[in-house]
Image (cartoon, rainbow, N blue to C red):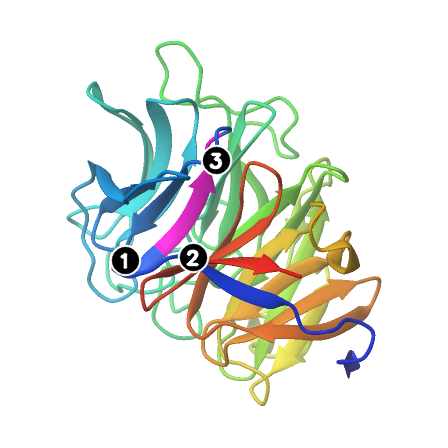
Amino acid sequence: MLAESLLALSLVDVKPVETGLSAPTSVVAAPNGTLFVTEKEGRIVKIPRKGKATTWYRIRVSSEGEQGLLSMVRINNKRFYAAYTDAKGALQVSRFTKGGGQRKIIRIPHPQYTNHNGGQLQLSKGLLYISTGDGGGSGDPFGAAERLSDLRGKILRIDPTCGSKRYCIPASNPRAGSPVIAYGLRNPWRFSIDASTDQIWIGDVGQNEVEEIDRMGVTAPLTDFGWSCWEGRRSYNPDRCAGRDVTAPALTYGRSEGESVTGGYVYRGAKVPKLRGWYVFGDFVSGRLWAYRDGSRKRIGRADGVTSFGLDQRGELLLTTIDGRVLRITK
């Protein structure tokens, strides 16, 4: 288990940017510093650098349990992709144009449970990355995470600008004809791509005992992170281990430290030099914030109910909390 130290990094400050929102789930920034925040019930809030927050867009979603408007990623001032659960509980990814409607890109059914939806989007070099949960319930009752024919419990990569087609499979994907680049995930609620290293960092929420952070390169072979054979580095269901070549987590932690990991970002900004090059993440339940690099994990602060992390236009760290706040990590 990784040693945790409070000495090498002093605690950072976490200061409010906006309050009074309703269960925010993600935050993204425009080049001019304007922030866009998704709320669970389907509203996107625009927060200018100066002035009041306003409703910018609304998406009709199902918001039972862990469902809702899960994340968005900007294309330009009027167009964006969003991941949300539709009226039947399926994970839907669509492209929206403000004032111009919706184009549905990919839909992944969740026929029975309202949890483990994943739903993080990242756009990198023109390709859209999507995280999906294992379909919910407990212990992956469908065996979805390990089956490559099932798009649940995965990281997907698609080309969403493919002429008349809804999407195409990039030639760079490790498995011809498949959007899957990683599998064996339980609920990868939040992940990010470090543009400086082309590393994907995945926060995968655990079952009973272990939270985990997984890591892979964008050009890596098809990668199996082991669920539900493994929960972190602990055996979970040996009956689902046959023939699997599992990649171990970059780090794990147990229930004494938290119960629901929220994946973050590798910090490349300028305002907090002591964090530069460290992967910053948190836990929704315990409120702890950590930084990780090269096998060392350090507790750096606290934010209760952290639902997501984001970056502003200068690469500075933002986060959202379930009680309606957007916060900024400062010195």
The residue closer to the viewer here, 245 or 77, is 77
> To which residue does mark 3 refer?
33
Q: Residue visible at 28% across and 44% down?
A: 52
> To which residue does mark 1 refer?
21
Q: Position of residue 84 (x, y in %)?
A: 29, 46
Q: Earlier in the sequence, mark 3 or mark 1?
A: 1
The residue closer to the viewer here, 199 or 5, is 5
- The amino acid beneath tag 1 is Leu
Q: Which mark is residue 133?
A: 2
Regarding residue 301, the answer to whether it shows in the image is yes
Q: Secondary structure at mark 1?
A: loop
Q: Earlier in the sequence, mark 1 or mark 2?
A: 1
Is residue 26 within the magenta segment? yes
- The amino acid beneath tag 2 is Gly
Q: Secondary structure at mark 3?
A: loop
Which contiguous range is marked in magenta? Answer: 25-30
**99 up-or-down from 231: above or below:** above
Is residue 200 within the magenta segment? no
Q: Residue visible at 78% across and 52% down?
A: 277
Q: Are marks 2 and 3 in contact (CB under 8 Å)?
A: no
Left or right of residue 276: residue 113? left
- The amino acid beneath tag 3 is Gly
The span from disc 2 to disc 3 (Cα, nearest Å) is 31 Å
Q: Position of residue 200 (x, y in %)?
A: 66, 46
